[in-house]
Image: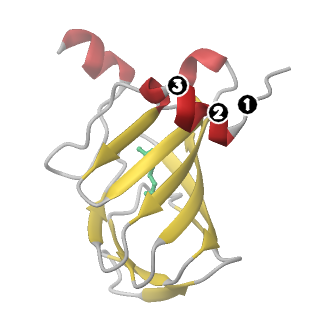
Amino acid sequence: MIVRDFNEIVEKERDRVVSDAQWSSVRMLLADDGMGFSFHITFLDAGSEHTFEYKNHFESVYCMQGTGSITDVATGETHYIKPGVMYALDKHDRHILRAEEELVMACCFNPPVTGNEVHREDGSYATAEDLETA
Ligand code: 9YT
């Protein structure tokens, strides 16, 4: 069994905490935990806008706190986000995520994130293979 405390990770396991432009993320589970998915608590700054496209991953995201919106770039459809709303990027959907208030999201990635990824120009994360050959 794996048991981890968010607050202890933030205090003592800084390698599990990742920040980029206007977001930060605490990785509760990563690839080497062997679960087949990674589990993150992600914070998106109030007023920020992000374009992501996880071409190599499926992701589901559950809003725990804050408000904002998500636009599906392919369809132009925009959905309001508030606590209780989940979105799943089942088609590796390119999307624009906007935080009106700070958003606190619980996210799962399949395949799991290793912890070494950085967002590429196109909004995706590289595969583990890409990282090995980089
Ligand atoms: C909300 C969202 O897109 N979260 C993605 C996870 C975060 N960028 C991370 O942990 O890498």
Q: Which mark is residue 8?
A: 2
Tag 2: amino acid: Glu
Quarter assignment of residue 15: top left
* 50 is higher (above) or lower (below) than 41: below
Is tag 2's residue or tag 3's residue first in the polypeptide sequence? 2
Q: Which residue is mark 3?
A: 13
Mark 1 lies within 8 Å of ligand 1 (Cβ measured): no
Give how far apart the Cα atoms at labels 2 and 1 are: 8 Å
Give how far apart the Cα atoms at labels 1 and 3 are: 11 Å
* 71 is higher (above) or lower (below) than 115: below
Q: Percent position (x, y) of residue 31?
A: 55, 22
Q: Percent position (x, y) of residue 105?
A: 57, 61
Q: Percent position (x, y) of residue 51?
A: 26, 65
Q: Which mark is residue 58?
A: none
Q: Bin the neighbour count of mark 3 within 10 Å (Cα to Cα): few under 14, some 14-19, many 20 and up.
A: few
Residues marked 2 and 3 touching at CB (< 8 Å): yes
Q: Residue at x 64, y 33 (%)?
A: 8
Left or right of residue 27: residue 56? left
